[in-house]
Amino acid sequence: MAALHSATPPRRPMRRLLRPLSLGVALSLALPLAGVSAACSASEGAVGGAAPGSGTQGASGIGDPDFPEDGNGGYDVEHYGLKLSYDPGSRRLSGSATVRARAVQDLTAFDLDLHGLTVSQVTVDGAAARFGRRDDELTISPVARIAKNARFDVTVDYAGVPDPIRNYANLGTYGFIATPDGSFVTCEPNGAKTWFPSNDHPSDKATYAFEITVPAGVTAIANGELAGTPVTSDGRTTFVWRERHPMASYLATMTTGRFETRTGESAAGTPIYAAVDPAFHGSLDTLYTKTGQITDYWSTVFGPYPFSSTGAVVDDYAAGYALENQTKPIYGGFAPDSGVMAHELAHQWFGDSVSITRWKDLWLNEGFATYAEWLWSEHEGGSTADTVFRNYYAKTADSMWSYPPGRAQRADLFNGSVYTRGAMTLHALRREIGDATFFALIKKWTASHQYGNATTEQFVGLAEQMSGKDLSGLFDAWLFQPRRPAAVA
């Protein structure tokens, strides 16, 4: 998540996605690529010690105590095959979602997350299954028990007008948002359920295939890479995208509309896909060029780029924020400056490749991406990371000192402290262990947890291991105490 776009950016986020410092093809249901699926950890039906479902009923939540109804227990998703058709005029979405999963317990029933939309049919391994709805839970009862460790396919056919999540805590509106010419889809933290049935929590990552059909002249953009040339027939065009690397559900998108696009490769050879609404025609070349430059630079700082392509999308929807959709960050209603782009592209490592296990550890995403902005400023000859750190530290009355960023709060998940004080934690760590160890630590972190999930405790443990120091006091002061830490030398 990144900055609100304004002439004078705020020093503290007021809602999600704000950054505190301005500076006709068949849908493949193939299994993940060899060497990738092993890094995709199973949810095991529980996160943070929560119990799985009762008996052979999968739990209705994955076990995150702050978001108890998000995700589901009893299975681990390996792949989503999404066949989608959207008409901007009527705002109607029709979908057939095939979810390939592995049972982590015996199952006679399990849930998927789905908000609104009407389900017409559910099958499990090709056999019709019973299903029921309660709030955002779709409960499915297959005709035969699914044995623990067995793989199974569940297909859900559904349709309707997507309803985004509105006025949720301090998060505003997110999920599937209709626009005059298509859709603007940004799903953090739990908006994937507004357009496809899912295990909607970042601790259960999966690969994706998208087959999206829209009126001719409309472009459909999703994660990963296009599988061939879009096919037009009877006035409608079908785009097939595949993301072969594990992805958290909130990073999935099916942004549609009228776009101008540019494709090519970065200097280091990473494919780039850039798209802008015609209202931002003049920004396309800069968007394309900067995306490649920043991706290549972060590859030298954070380790090899973890995905098969990079990109950017600017839509003419006045969201005023950006989201790090995997492989294609999206910017809502503004042409981003390089600082915002540096933030979103850093998320491809921190949040997208290395994802959080629980929402309380959100600083591992936002603190790292914010610190990346400071590093980019220094790289570009602007303020150094140390200068930015000290300027923030001098703000003795800032409200971030009363909000410990190591424990993000559900009702204020994207508080400015998670961004700024999270970034300050990293700078304090850097000063304590030295540049050589710090940057080696960052590369080790992204390599050790690539395509998987991680926790604050794991980061602290790795930092102590690599530095040979007891860092408990430093992390406690910067992440967990509701007060301004002692000065850093």
Image (spheres, helix red, strand yellow):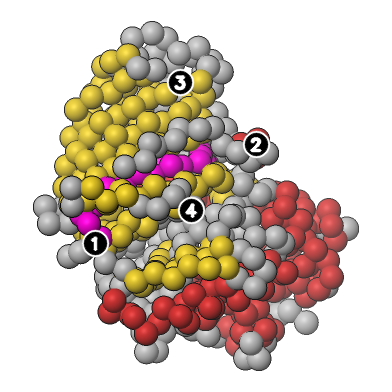
Residue that label 2 marks: 34
Position of residue 361 relative to residue 124, above or below, is: below
Position of residue 306 relative to residue 181, above or below, is: above
| Quarter of the image where one finds residue 483 | bottom right
SS class, disc 3: strand
Q: Position of residue 201 (x, y in %)?
A: 45, 43
Residue at x 17%, y 65% (from the top left corner): 180
Q: Nearer the viewer, mark 2 or mark 3?
A: 2
Position of residue 376 relative to residue 218, above or below, is: below
| Quarter of the image where one finds residue 7 | bottom left
Residue range (magenta) = 198-218
Comes first in the chain, label 1 or label 2: 2
* Magenta-colored stretch includes residue 210: yes
Residue at x 56%, y 46% (from the top left corner): 245
Q: Amino acid at mark 2?
A: Ala
SS class, disc 2: loop
Residue that label 4 marks: 225
Left/right of residue 462 with respect to residue 79 in the rendered view:
right
Disc 2 and disc 3: Cα gap in Å? 19 Å
Residue that label 3 marks: 152
Residue 350 in view in this figure: no
Comes first in the chain, label 4 or label 1: 1
Left/right of residue 251 with respect to residue 133 in the rendered view:
right
Comes first in the chain, label 1 or label 3: 3
